[in-house]
Image (cartoon, rainbow, N blue to C red):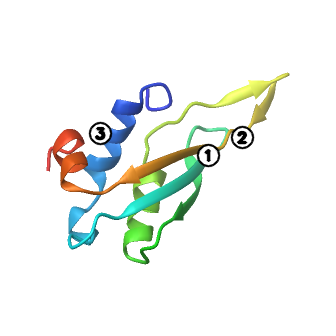
Amino acid sequence: LYGTNQDSLLTYIYNNINWKLIPTFQEPIAIVDFSANANGEVDEVNVSSEWQDPFLSEVSRVFKSIPKWNIYYSKEQFVRVKRGLILFFNEETKKRYSSK
């Protein structure tokens, strides 16, 4: 579901972020590279941002909580596929994707 529908993925991310940990005086941007293991669990997350913890840890926590991610096989062998996403943390994205 989340691997094929970006709106669903963004809704999940922005609904599960603890917005109290997001700096409000500026609009942080995070570049997230992630991948899932053979069970579809997101287990590798790398967050790049000019911001530090607790912001980085919070973004990583939410990605690791994604219920199931698409998994891929080639010649009956699991293939880890890395994905990337740019996230904008501002009032516009909060209003569009978050119910909080």
Residue tagged by mark 3? 11
Q: Is residue 66 left or right of residue 43?
A: left
Q: Earlier in the sequence, mark 1 or mark 2?
A: 1
Q: In this orientation, which residue lies closer to the viewer: 36 or 81?
A: 81
Q: Amino acid at mark 2?
A: Arg
Q: Is residue 66 above or below residue 4?
A: below
Gap between marks 2 and 3, in whole Å?
24 Å
Q: Is residue 84 left or right of residue 53?
A: right
Residue tagged by mark 1? 35
Q: Is residue 52 above or below residue 79?
A: below
Q: Residue 40: x percent and y percent?
A: 58, 38
Q: Secondary structure at mark 2?
A: loop
Q: Is residue 60 left or right of residue 74?
A: left
Q: Amino acid at mark 3?
A: Thr
Tag shown at residue 80: 2
Q: Amino acid at mark 1?
A: Ser
Gap between marks 1 and 3, in whole Å?
19 Å
Extreme residue in the right direction: 75
Q: Secondary structure at mark 3?
A: helix
Q: Residue 11: x percent and y percent?
A: 29, 39
Q: Secondary structure at mark 1?
A: strand
Mark in the foreground, 2 or 3: 3
